[in-house]
């Protein structure tokens, strides 16, 4: 017999399978001769009451053997001599599109401007330690994309976009912990995800795909609004039966290439703001009412939203036990992002606090058409850089001082390795944006008692929440609305907002291409 039950138990019991089995036997009134096996389907933390509990959805197998999980790799085919699809970008959209194409018997040829996931580390150290920005290899560009070294969070609301469980299973088959299959907010961590990405690459290569690093796509091969290939590094021509464009939200040169080739693009709403950093112990005390927190509980997180003057202000990419990192993709700009290691054991918690940017915020940029948001974004990033000393040090301000419109006298510790310095962020952010964030912080302090604190720091600029440009495509075929055999995909095209949603979009585009080739 099989059945499902939901239980809420203490954290120390939830992570001990021996204790958990005894609880389940008691819960189900099983006899001594009954054999019980179980599988946890969903796990979440419930911290609403004074004592935090773990909610579990469990499938029980009473006197039955649990079925084995299907292995997705078993569906892959050798594709080295088959039809070819060029994929521009080796992030989650590009790699999951490649794996889906292999499943359909089509050869993926992947090009990425950056380096392989291990080689990227040298360039990440250069920007952290020496403020040297490699425009082709950084926290955004290179194998695995922006998510690889900025946290590896896998939570998505995109349940209607595709098979989330399949995407997670692929990650598990390539080395991720099986915990991501059951946790409500799954997370791999920036120390673990590079190894997973490397194994994804090995699978693509083993089944006949190709992957080329240090390969910047500098032109498209077009004739009569049909794409047949790409030019790499200004000289090498590659042809394919279709081209998937999966370059991520920060590949501005690709947007300008599209403009140069008269390929349609659209402006798209995005969000911009700051990173806020607190001591993790403070967030734990607020959320769990524990200091220190139990060793059985993960570093606590939060989610906050407010409506200010008709515009949303919200927390974004919250990183418990995390770090703030420099995410600039070119010299002369300041951009920050957040990340966590798998254990989330940093003494800091950080989150983007951002506000929606739309046409009303871009009135001065109308002459830039679909690139209005892009130019707006670039100008603010340069302003933050120009305010500093020419390094990747980031301007920062105590939360209470920002709200009270005064410059901070002193600054405490921060996880941001390049360093922070005192600044009046109201002078660096556009007035409407700074006022919205200012008012939202007051509301956040009322919603989450203790959050509004002088221990909180605003660090700027959080500007790469999503692409400010969308590349239009047909809703059914996923093909560009103007260019045949051209498939915009993932975050850079404006159709995803994280690792899993980008992976699902890659899979969907690959399926559409396979269907068109039948």
Image (cartoon, rainbow, N blue to C red):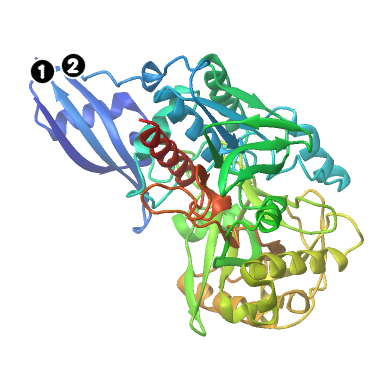
Residue 432, image x, y percentages = 64, 82
Q: Is residue 394 above or below residue 119?
A: below
Rendering coords of residue 5 (x, y %): 17, 39
Cα distance in 3D space between marks 1 and 2: 12 Å
Quadrant showing the C terminus: top left
Query: In the orientation shown, which residue stands out farthest toward the bottom?
Result: 309
Judged left or right of residue 96, residue 33 is left
| Residue 437 x, y percent position in the rendering | 60, 75
- Left or right relative to 193: residue 78: left
Which quadrant does the N terminus fall into? top left
> Residue sitting at 50 percent across and 57 percent down?
472
In the rendered structure, the answer to whether residue 95 lies left or right of residue 53 reads right
Residue shown at the point (71%, 63%) measured from the top left: 461
Mark 1 crowdedness (10 Å alpha carbons): few <14, some 14-19, many ≥20: few
Res. 109 in view: yes
Label annotation for residue 18: none
Q: Position of residue 465 (x, y in %)?
A: 59, 58
Q: Determine the secondary structure under disc 2.
A: loop
| Quarter of the figure with residue 135 | top right
Closer-to-camera residue (313/49): 313
Q: Which residue is mark 2?
A: 65
Residue 322 or residue 296, whichever sits in front: 322
Decide if residue 319 is in sight here: no
Quarter-of-image position of residue 19: top left
Pointer 1 residue? 34
User: Is the residue 299 above or below the residue 208 in the image?
Assistant: below
């Amino acid at each position: 017999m099989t059945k499902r039950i939901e239980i809420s138990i203490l954290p120390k019991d939830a992570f001990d399978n021996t204790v958990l089995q005894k609880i389940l036997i008691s819960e189900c009134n099983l006899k001594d001769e009954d054999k019980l096996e179980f599988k946890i389907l969903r796990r979440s933390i419930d911290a609403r009451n004074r004592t935090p509990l773990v909610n579990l959805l469990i499938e029980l197998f009473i006197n039955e053997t649990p079925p084995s999980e299907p292995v997705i790799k078993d569906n892959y085919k050798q594709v080295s001599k088959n039809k070819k699809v060029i994929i521009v970008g080796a992030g989650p959209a590009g790699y999951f599109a490649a794996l889906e194409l292999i499943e359909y018997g089509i050869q993926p040829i992947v090009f990425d401007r950056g380096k392989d996931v291990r080689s990227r580390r040298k360039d990440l150290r250069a920007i952290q330690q020496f403020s040297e920005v490699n425009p082709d290899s950084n926290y955004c560009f290179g194998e695995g994309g922006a998510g690889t070294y900025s946290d590896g969070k896998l939570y998505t609301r995109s349940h209607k976009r595709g098979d989330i469980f399949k995407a997670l299973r692929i990650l598990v088959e390539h080395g991720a912990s099986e915990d991501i299959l059951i946790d409500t907010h799954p997370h791999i961590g920036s120390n673990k995800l590079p190894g997973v990405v490397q194994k994804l690459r090995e699978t693509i290569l083993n089944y006949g795909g190709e992957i080329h690093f240090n390969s910047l796509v500098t032109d498209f091969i077009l004739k009569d609004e049909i794409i047949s290939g790409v030019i790499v590094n200004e000289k090498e021509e590659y042809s394919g039966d279709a081209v998937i464009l999966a370059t991520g939200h920060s590949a501005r040169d690709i947007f300008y290439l599209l403009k140069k080739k008269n390929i349609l693009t659209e402006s798209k709403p995005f969000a911009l703001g700051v990173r806020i950093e607190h001591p993790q112990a403070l967030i734990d005390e607020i959320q769990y009412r524990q200091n220190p927190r139990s060793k059985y509980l993960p570093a606590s997180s939060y989610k906050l939203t407010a409506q200010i003057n008709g515009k949303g202000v919200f927390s974004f990419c919250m990183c418990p036990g995390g770090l703030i990192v420099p995410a600039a993709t070119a010299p002369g700009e300041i951009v920050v992002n957040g990340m966590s290691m798998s254990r989330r054991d940093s003494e800091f918690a950080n989150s983007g606090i951002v506000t929606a940017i739309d046409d009303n915020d871009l009135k001065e940029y109308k002459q830039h058409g679909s690139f209005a948001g892009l130019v707006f974004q670039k100008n603010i990033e340069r302003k933050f850089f120009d305010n500093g000393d020419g390094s990747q040090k980031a301007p920062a301000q105590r939360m209470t001082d920002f709200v009270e419109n005064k410059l901070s006298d002193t600054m405490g510790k921060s996880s941001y390795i390049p360093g922070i310095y005192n600044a009046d962020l109201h002078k660096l952010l556009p007035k409407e944006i700074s006022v919205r964030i200012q008012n939202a912080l007051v509301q956040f302090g009322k919603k989450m008692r203790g959050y509004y604190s002088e221990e909180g720091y605003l660090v700027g600029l959080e500007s790469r929440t999503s692409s400010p440009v969308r590349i239009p495509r047909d809703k059914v075929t996923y093909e560009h609305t103007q260019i045949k055999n051209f498939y915009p995909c993932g975050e850079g095209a404006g159709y995803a907002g994280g690792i899993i949603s980008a992976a699902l979009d890659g899979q969907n585009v690959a399926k559409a291409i396979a269907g068109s080739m039948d």
